Amino acid sequence: MNITYYGHSCFGIEVNGKHLLFDPFITPNEMAKHIDIKSVKADYILISHGHEDHMADAEVIAKRTNAEVICSWEINVWLGKKAVNNIHPMNIGGKIKRDFGNIKAVVAMHSSSLPDGTYGGTAMGFVIETEQGNFYYAGDTALTYDMKLIGDYRKIDFAFLPIGDNFTMGVDNAIIATEFIKCDDIIGMHYDTFELIKVNKEEAITKFKNHGTSLTLMNIGETISK
Ligand code: NI
Ligand code: MN
């Protein structure tokens, strides 16, 4: 798998020759000005919830790529009104099969409204199951005991967890989440983009290390392999 970071909570994952794009928020992100969104590939766009910092570029990228958009029923209706045609609605607990593997929508403890204030349904996370490994994309969430279900459900090889605090869990709760999901290989997200979610990156990495876990904080535009 190849993982490319586009800033904030936006990642592109290449698996089995397919491109999954999570929570596209690139053009409004001051830290991601060097990313050309026309270069962002997508066969699938997964949206965890309706907040603008998770879907600002979803409509434009969906229309350019004709990627299948995976999101809540409510976001599906909203994007449908904007003439995004290739959408698959889900809700937490559901699982769908695709050519690269499976997508399971899981609990996220967070709110969800669309940029114009429309109700966005329930916020979600995703567990992605593939022959190359499984990973968990938490979306925006507090630490929740429901994460223990994820650890019991599948072997999670690596996970994307928010660490920025204030709107989501912070570093200390994310470390507890690693125990719940039984995964020690974490990629951090949802930090530094805004003043309210600035973190001390060195300290965060050290805290994870002291706990026997690994926190990777990718540079925007960087690609790593797993
Ligand atoms: Ni949010
Ligand atoms: Mn957010």
Image (cartoon, grey):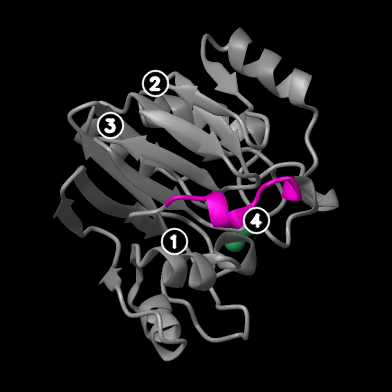
The quarter of the displayed image where residue 116 is located: bottom right
* Residue 33 percent location from the top left of the image: 76, 50
How many angstroms separate mark 4 from mark 3 (CA)?
25 Å
Residue 34 inside the magenta-drawn segment? yes
Q: Are marks 1 and 4 in contact (CB under 8 Å)?
A: no
Which mark is nearer the camera, 2 or 1? 2
Q: Secondary structure at mark 4?
A: loop
Q: Quadrant of the C terminus?
A: top left
Q: Secondary structure at mark 1?
A: loop
Task: Report the quarter where the N terminus lies.
Answer: top left
| Residue range (magenta) | 32-41
**Measured from the top left, where is residue 89 in percent x and y?**
28, 72
Q: Amino acid at mark 1?
A: Ile
Dot 4 corresponds to which residue?
A: 26
The amino acid type found where label 4 is placed reads Ile
Label 3 sits on a secondary structure element that is strand
CB within 8 Å, label 2 to label 1: no
Amino acid type, label 2: Lys
Q: Splitting the image into 4 quarters, where does residue 54 fall? A: bottom right
Assign ligand 2 to one image quadrant.
bottom right
Between residue 74 and residue 211, name the one nearer to us: 74
Residue that appears at 45% across and 64% down: 123
- Read off the residue under disc 2: 226
Q: Residues within 10 Å of mark 4 (few under 14, many from 20)?
A: many
Quickly name the residue at label 1: 47
Q: In the rendered structure, find residue 134 and report the number of the disc placed on it.
A: 3
Work out whether mark 1 precedes mark 4 in sequence or the reverse, and give the earlier one: 4
